[in-house]
Structures are given as C-alpha cells and as structure tokens.
Image (tube, rainbow, N blue to C red):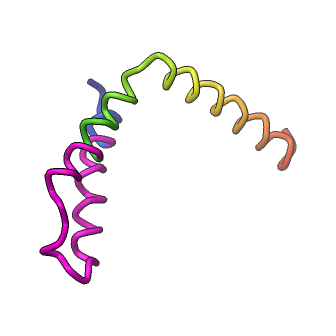
Amino acid sequence: MTHLNLVSFVGIFVLTAIAWTFSTNRKVMNWRAMRFWGVEVSALVAATPACFMVASVSGVFATNGGAFLFGK
C-alpha cells in the first residue's frame, strides 16, 4: 500500500467528517448506510480491473485534452 492509497483512504473519512460538520441535522445521519455505501462499496469497485481500465483511459484523455487546449 503506497502513501497515495493511504491518503485516499483517509480522504473518505475526512469528507464524511466535513459533511457531518456542515450538516443541519446531525442526528439523522445513518452511519451504518454511510459506512456501507461510502467505504465498502467504494473499495470493492476500486479493486475491480474495470476500474483500473477506466482510470487509465480517462488519464489518457485528460493528458491529450490538456495538450490540445494548452499546446505542447
């Protein structure tokens, strides 16, 4: 596990804490559902080969689009 994976993992909890901080009704938050949908499903989807392929292709598009807009 690289440091980038750790940063991403911690980011899930930081975003949840920010959402909780700015929530107007904190008692209504369903922590069990947030844990399942926010952490477990995200980790499951991120571990699939299709996710790696989509990330690779989107990275190529982003690189080519940036070169098109800003020149190389």
Q: Main secondary structure of the magenta part?
A: helix
The structure residue drawn at horizontal position 64% and vertical position 33%, both measured from the top left corner, is 58
- Front-most of 51 and 11? 51
Rendered location of residue 16, percent (x, y): 26, 59
Location of residue 21 with respect to 57 vertically, above or below? below
Relative to 23, is 67 on the left or the right? right
The structure residue drawn at horizontal position 25% and vertical position 83%, both measured from the top left corner, is 24
Please tell me whether residue 11 belongs to the stretch shown in magenta.
Answer: yes
- Front-most of 54 and 60? 54
The residue at the far bottom in this view is 24
Q: Which residues fall within the magenta stretch?
A: 8-37
* Number of dots carrying numbers: 0
Which image quadrant is residue 57 in? top right
The N terminus appears in which quarter of the rendering?
top left
Rendered location of residue 3, percent (x, y): 29, 33
Relative to 55, is 61 on the left or the right? right
The structure residue drawn at horizontal position 34% and vertical position 37%, both measured from the top left corner, is 42
The structure residue drawn at horizontal position 59% and vertical position 24%, both measured from the top left corner, is 56
The C terminus appears in which quarter of the rendering?
top right
Please tell me whether residue 31 belongs to the stretch shown in magenta.
Answer: yes
Location of residue 56 with respect to 62 vertically, above or below? above
